Amino acid sequence: MSGLGLVLLKRLLLSLRLNLRKLILYSTILSVSGLFVVSLFILNYVIKDQLIQNSLSVNEKYAEKIAVSANQHFSDMLKELEYSAKQLEQDINNPELTYAEVKRLKYQSDNFNSILLVDPQQQMLAYAPKSLALSFQQTYSTPGIIESLQQKKTYISSTYWSVKGNLVILMSQPIYHQQQYLGMISGTIYLQQKNVINDMLSTQYDYKNSHLYVLDQDDRIIFHPDENRIGEKIINNSGLAYIRQHQKGSIQLTNSLGVDNLAGFAHIPSVNWIVISQQPTDALLAQAHTLLFKVSVGIFIFYLFIFLLVWWISNFISSPLNRLAKMASMLNQHDIQDKIKKVDPWYFEVLKFRTSLLLSSENFRNRITELKQHVNTDPLTGLYNRRGMEVFLKELVNTQTTFAALAIDIDFFKKINDQYGHDQGDVVLKTLAQIMQTNFREHDICCRSGGEEFLVLMTTADPLVAHKAAERLRLTMQDNQINQMGQITISIGIAFWPKDAVDVAAVLKIADNKLYEAKHSGRNCIRSTVKSSA
């Protein structure tokens, strides 16, 4: 932070009139609030990232588990076809043998929806079940049959429509006898009916809208919870190229419907299919928001407890310092040292502060004593003269001690001197000085400012206290008989620092003006800048 920035910050703090406790509380609020917000951002990131990683991992492991299980099952199905091919190669033209074998293959494991035995000329030699009602004289040219006969090896087709209008996948094994190709034995899976794929893949796995589907080698859906999508070719899937290039893994992708998903995948080597388990990202993040809300409530309660604890501790820490700080402006009070000693210095800073205040208070008392002894006083009355008054005024201002200035003048003093002589005038002055010293407190400053004019500096900001003291002085002087000179009265003007003015000279001028206002009002009265309710 630049020097200018520090200056502006200091001015701002001063304008707020912060004490230590408020400073601790505001700092705590700022820190805790900042920490709470940062914690929410971090938690939001960590929770979402962890949920995404967990979802990707779970989907990958699930897809791999299904793929391994399916691969073994499809391998067994191909072996079943291979076994039948070896049986049929012995006498493929025997109708009883061929029918018995296709019937056994169909119903022994029920892995296939139908079994077809086809010769190289694309004519049906045998089939099961009988409900297919296929013709033995007809040539069949479905994509699966044609490609299987052309390849003359183990074959697994893509999805296609059969002659009976079923969306199917065909798995076949070639039949050879002494290296002569005799045809193929095939099993078909009806994708839109109950089939072995549905039996293997239809599970209760549906965590947070997760679902499983299977693609064939041409990226067509051969299994999906939504049966309407079976046979659909996958396009515009952002992760499909990556999935084709890796045997297993996980990826965040946008599917062909434009929905963002977290997917795990694994290939089925025996059939070159892909098992994909995926979960919509939005469904997962909805869980994250719920979890984040619960965690946020917990953190908020914890931080609230921390704030209340800091609030209590701040009060415990700042209380002795606050009390000492208030006492620092009252060092002139006679019982201030006892008050300072009552503050418990339970930590180092308070101990040092208290010790410093006690030393300052002692020094203040010593300075007052010294001033009383060494500052020039008025030789006639024994009161402080103008020079002593200035010293005390400076001390009061430096310690920020509020005070009332009482300007006092003896009424018709010139007449007393003229009528009774200056000696008697001096008696009047000394009598008033003695009454003032008796009337005011020890720590109030009584001065003779010149001639018959006096000034009292009362360390109080209470107008009622100042007015009562002035009235008591006025009445005492009025009732006092001095050498048979008759009734002698005084007039008093009162002003307050710093309430009436920040400048001390201005306050004294205001008190003087109030004094003259009292004289013009008939003398023997008091005029103040603040109306008293006494």
Image (cartoon, rainbow, N blue to C red):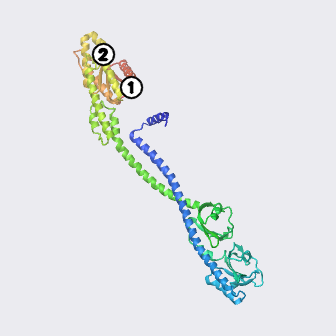
State how far apart marks 2 and 1 are (Cα): 22 Å
Q: Tell me where residue 4 appears, x and y as whole percent.
A: 49, 33
Q: Tell me where residue 211 appears, x and y as whole percent.
A: 59, 67
Horizontal side of 71 relative to 401 (left or right) equals right
Picture quarter containing residue 223? Answer: bottom right
Q: How many other residues sit within 10 Å of disc 2, few (<14), some (14-19) or many (≥20)? A: some
Q: Residue at x 28, y 27 (%)?
A: 443
Picture quarter containing residue 433? Answer: top left
280 shown above or below 331: below
Instruction: Give the residue type at disc 1.
Output: Thr
Q: Tell me where residue 371 appears, x and y as whole percent.
A: 28, 23
Q: Tell me where residue 337 appears, x and y as whole percent.
A: 27, 34
Q: Disc 1 designates what residue?
A: 529
For the C terminus, the quadrant is top left
Visible in this render: residue 279? no
Visible in this render: residue 477? yes
The foreground one among 533 and 32 is 32
Instruction: Give the residue type at disc 2.
Output: Glu
The foreground one among 406 and 276 is 276
481 shown above or below 332: above
Q: How many other residues sit within 10 Å of disc 1, few (<14), some (14-19) or many (≥20)? A: some
Indicate the secondary structure of the residue bearing disc 1.
Answer: loop
Q: Disc 2 designates what residue?
A: 452
The foreground one among 329 and 87 is 87
Horizontal side of 500 relative to 442 (left or right) equals right
Q: Residue at x 30, y 34 (%)?
A: 356
Q: Residue at x 41, y 43 (%)?
A: 24
* Sequence-first tag of 2 and 1: 2
4 shown above or below 168: above
Indicate the secondary structure of the residue bearing disc 2.
Answer: loop
